[in-house]
Image (spheres, coloured by chain):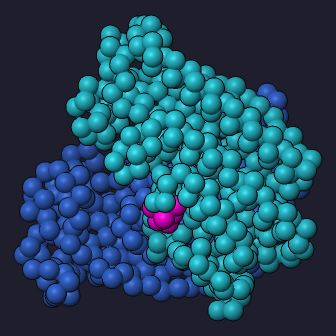
Chain colours: A blue, B cyan
């Protein structure tokens, strides 16, 4: 059986699996619409243009991009639902859960966003939630999980913004499981790191999680329970990010602050192109390149070996990137 | 025997090898100085600042960067001479010439440059030459080769500039071997490609070669003969690039042309961070990051899914990137 010969819908999945896939696709499309409305309103004037694309191997997506924003220089929110034969490499990487468990096909749906504000006083934010499942040659489910997260990249050392962001994440996550915030905060700190820059963090973290399976001993949430948590992740920015935008959007900024924002955006580019698994996977598997690279900033700068005085705002921002306990943090700026 | 315990100079190499290494290091340092003078003069006002750095595993380098140029927005010329234990991965990749041949240590020296002009009418140029050798545990030479090349990245569709560049390379290479230009031109066309951008070329190519060993049947040049060719590669820009700079540096340009230059520089960043073997190797082996990333442009732009009218200068530039026979080309612009 080959997906190139038979459309995947004919091959698979079993009826109960098909229902859940349809539900998952609708769920993600709903979050995509909510996030588009949220950022349209938050921007205060910009509009999103939309591109619909199809993936040759099965499925497709909807890309929405704002480039005329008042607050945001570029905002991209993308959703996709793709399916097909499980690539051999992915099957092997999944170990006993992949090929060894009889998995031959995959289904994945998710929504992903990055917004690049105009002002260096307003941080960049990234958010992604996704659902992934594997089926065997009879179309029966062999594994399923959720993943996602959100992280903040400030360009100016407003420590209070880190506190706002992390406390909102903690409050949201604690409603679902006491271990989610601390575990996923640590995972985030370990993931968004420019190893080649002496392990400098991309931003001040947030939460990051993957392979979050229903009914695991570590949390005891069923499919609906995990999905409810992931939905709350997708909706957390109204508490975690909106207050920061509201208090920083009208702050004045100067040329040096704008320049430093562009230099830090260069580090964002480095992380996404050199280290980010999602980006590299997308580029290597011939996904739609404009959607994969929608996260890149509109403008970025590279300076050779910049040096900053210890008390400069640049040096304070770099120190602020060192992982810390934001919940108990009570330092000023 | 471990390089962490004994300094590499004590371990190796045998006297004749040591003499050749010292000569190779002086040769590269001489080319580095020549190239620095050349670009200082060509710029017409900017100055290079210099950083000397040491590599923890052995050796070091000299980085020279110009950021105050009249013609060049950023110009970086780097040389290095490094040695140490051969990384296992590299030994395996060399197959029968590496670990299987008893190679345990390496020595490499080279000079590398990228210049990013201010004007979009002046192309970016990259050049690199390098010498590499392997020794066994007794310090005896087991293999040695040269590599290098130069390629041009225009931002405006001046076809005449591609002709100038390639004909100068052909004239230079033909003095050494009739196969060098055609073979190394093709290698270059195949190497500098953004595979993830539907195989779009980074620029209009030039020449690229690696593992060019003395006394091989394909060319019959000895060590001195190959080195003479590689020296000429390092000196070819006075014929291949200087005439282009001279005829374009005073051309007027507008905002749309500058913007397109920044978008194309974004593609340059993508190639260097996603595909370039030298950059990836440098980032993975903890080389000095500021030297590895010296090639990145001072400013780059990403636009979402830009579209250009078929007759626009942008569309004509993109068409100009398709590999062609520049020697026989007689099309206008």
Q: In the shown orientation, is residue B246 left or right of residue B170?
A: right
Q: Quadrant of residue B247?
A: bottom right
Query: Which residue occupies the foreground of this view, A109 or B290?
Result: B290
Q: Residue at x 32, y 10 (%)?
A: B1
Expressed as whole percent of the image width and height from the top left, the position of residue A49 reads 61, 85
Identify which residue is drawn at 66% across, 86% down: B331
Front residue of B228 and A245: B228
Question: Is residue B204 something that shows in the picture?
Answer: yes
Instruction: State which quarter of the image contains the N terminus of chain A.
Output: bottom left
Figure check: A300 above or below B203: above
Q: Residue at x 16, y 54 (%)?
A: A97
Q: Which residues are magenta?
A: B181-189
Q: Is residue B61 above or below residue A212?
A: above
Q: In the image, is residue B187 part of the stretch drawn in magenta?
A: yes
Q: Is residue B3 above or below residue A240?
A: above
Tell which of B125 and A81 is nearer to you: B125
Is residue A254 visible in the rendered structure shown here? Answer: no
Residue sitting at x 19%, y 54%: A92
Quadrant in which residue B35 is drawn: top right
The picture places residue A239, in percent across and down from the top left corner, at 60, 59
x and y, in percent, of residue B254 in the image: 86, 76
Pinpoint residue A224: horizontal percent, then vertical percent: 29, 66
Task: Tell me the chief SS of the magenta region.
Answer: helix
Residue toward you, B26 or A165: B26
| Quadrant for the C terminus of chain A in the image | top right
């Amino acid at each position: 059986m080959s997906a190139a010969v038979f459309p995947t819908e004919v091959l698979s999945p079993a009826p109960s699996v098909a229902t859940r896939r349809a539900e998952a696709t609708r769920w993600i499309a709903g979050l995509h619409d909510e996030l588009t409305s949220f950022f349209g309103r938050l921007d205060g004037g910009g509009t999103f243009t939309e591109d619909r694309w199809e993936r040759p191997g099965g499925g497709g997506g909807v890309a929405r991009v704002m480039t005329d924003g008042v607050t945001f220089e570029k905002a991209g929110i993308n959703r996709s639902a793709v399916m097909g034969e499980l690539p051999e490499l992915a099957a092997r990487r999944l170990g006993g859960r992949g090929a060894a468990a009889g998995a031959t096909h995959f289904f994945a749906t998710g929504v992903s966003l990055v917004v690049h504000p105009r002002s260096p006083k307003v941080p960049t934010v990234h958010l992604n939630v996704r659902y992934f499942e594997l089926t065997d040659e009879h179309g029966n489910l062999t594994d399923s999980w959720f993943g996602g997260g959100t992280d903040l990249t400030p360009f100016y050392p407003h420590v209070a913004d880190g506190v706002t962001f992390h406390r909102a994440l903690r409050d949201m996550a604690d409603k679902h499981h006491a271990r989610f915030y601390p575990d996923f905060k640590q995972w985030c700190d370990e993931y968004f790191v420019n190893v080649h820059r002496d392990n400098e963090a991309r931003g001040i973290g947030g939460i990051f999680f993957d392979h979050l399976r229903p009914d695991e001993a570590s949390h005891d949430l069923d499919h609906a329970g995990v999905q409810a948590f992931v939905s709350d992740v997708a909706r957390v920015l109204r508490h975690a990010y909106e207050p920061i935008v509201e208090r920083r959007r009208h702050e004045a900024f100067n040329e040096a602050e704008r320049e430093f924002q562009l230099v830090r955006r260069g580090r964002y580019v480095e992380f996404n192109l050199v280290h980010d698994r999602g980006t590299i996977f997308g580029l290597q598997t011939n996904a739609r390149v404009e959607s994969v690279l929608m996260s890149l900033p509109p403008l970025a700068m590279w300076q050779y070996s910049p040096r900053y005085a210890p008390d400069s705002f640049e040096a304070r921002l770099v120190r602020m990137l060192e992982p810390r306990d934001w919940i108990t943090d009570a330092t000023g700026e």
